[in-house]
Image (cartoon, helix red, strand yellow):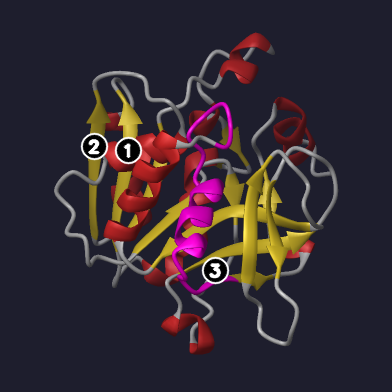
Amino acid sequence: MIVIPMAGASRRFFEAGYEEPKYRLPLAGQSVFAHAVGSFSALFDTMAFRFVVASGAEAFVAAEAERLGIATFDVRVLDRPTAGQAETVEQGLVDVADATPLTIFNIDTFRPGFTFPGGWFDDLDGWLEVFRGEGANWSYVRPADGPEPRALETAEKRPISDLCCTGLYHFARAGDFRMALDAERRAPQAAELYVAPIYNHLIGKGARIGYSLIEPAEVIFCGTPAEYAALKAGR
C-alpha cells in the first residue's frame, strides 16, 4: 500500500499570498497533487493507494485520483490535527493489517518514473530513498561501512551525512511502523512525529534498514513557495 499524508495546513503558501493549499495549485497543466501522485503511474493498476487528508480535501483528491486512473484508492479524512506526518499516516492505517507492506510519500515531491528498487531491498525490514545533498532542512541517513547500502541511523533536520531523504519511506510491515511510532512517542527525537527518525527504533532492535540512492536530478521538490515559483517559471 502507498500512503500519502496530506493533512498539513500549507501555512507557508498561505502566508506567501496563495489562496489554495499547495497540492491544489496549478503547474504545467496539472495540479501539484497530480505531479506528486503521478510519480507512481507505473503502479496505478497494481498497488492500493490511500490518501490521508484534512476535512474539505476529499472531493478534490477523489476526483484527481479518478482522473489519473488509479485502479484502487481510498481517501481517509482526519477529524483533528495530528502531531506530525507519522501520526497522520498512523491515523490513516486503522484498518490496515500489520503484515501489509507500507510505502509513504510526500505530496510535495515528484519522482517521475518511480519503480521499487527490488533485489536486495526485497529482503529488508525497511528502507529510505535518498540523494546526495546539503543543508539542514532534510531527513538524513547515516550509512554503514561496507558495500551494502545499509542505514545505521536516521535523523530529522540534523545533518548526520550527505544522504538526504526524498520523502519516500518504506516499511516491510505496517506493524513495524506502528511499533516504531509508539516507541518514538515515548522517547521523541524531534519536535514533531516525523517518519524518518522512527527507523532508529527498528535499527535498535536489529532490523535491517537500507537506503536507495538516486541522483539529485531524479527528484523534484515543490514544498516551498520558492520551489513552486521556480517550477512555474521553468527553472
Q: Is residue 144 magenta?
A: no
Between residues 153 and 101, which one lies in front from this camera angle? 153
Proximity of marks 3 and 2: CB atoms separated by less than 8 Å: no
On-image quarter of the N terminus: bottom left
Mark 2 surroundings: few (<14), some (14-19) or many (≥20) residues within 10 A: some
Measured as percent of width and height from the top left, residue 132 is found at 80, 61
Residue 145 in which image quadrant: bottom right
Q: Is residue 209 magenta?
A: yes
The amino acid type, in three-letter code, at marker 2 is Arg
Sooner in the amino-acid sequence: mark 3 or mark 2:
2
Between residues 124 and 225, which one lies in front from this camera angle? 124
On-image quarter of the C terminus: top right
The image shows residue 8, relative to residue 76, as above or below, that is above
Between residues 156 and 228, which one lies in front from this camera angle? 156
For the question of whether residue 145 can be seen, the reply is yes
Proximity of marks 2 and 1: CB atoms separated by less than 8 Å: yes
The amino acid type, in three-letter code, at marker 3 is Phe
For the question of whether residue 63 can be seen, the reply is no
For marks 1 and 3, give the CA distance. Answer: 21 Å
In the picture, the disc for residue 76 is 2
For marks 3 and 2, give the CA distance. Answer: 24 Å
Sooner in the amino-acid sequence: mark 1 or mark 3:
1
Location of mark 1 (residue):
52
Which segment did they paint magenta?
A: 189-210
Task: Kindly identify the residue that appears in the image at 46 percent across and 77 percent down.
Answer: 124
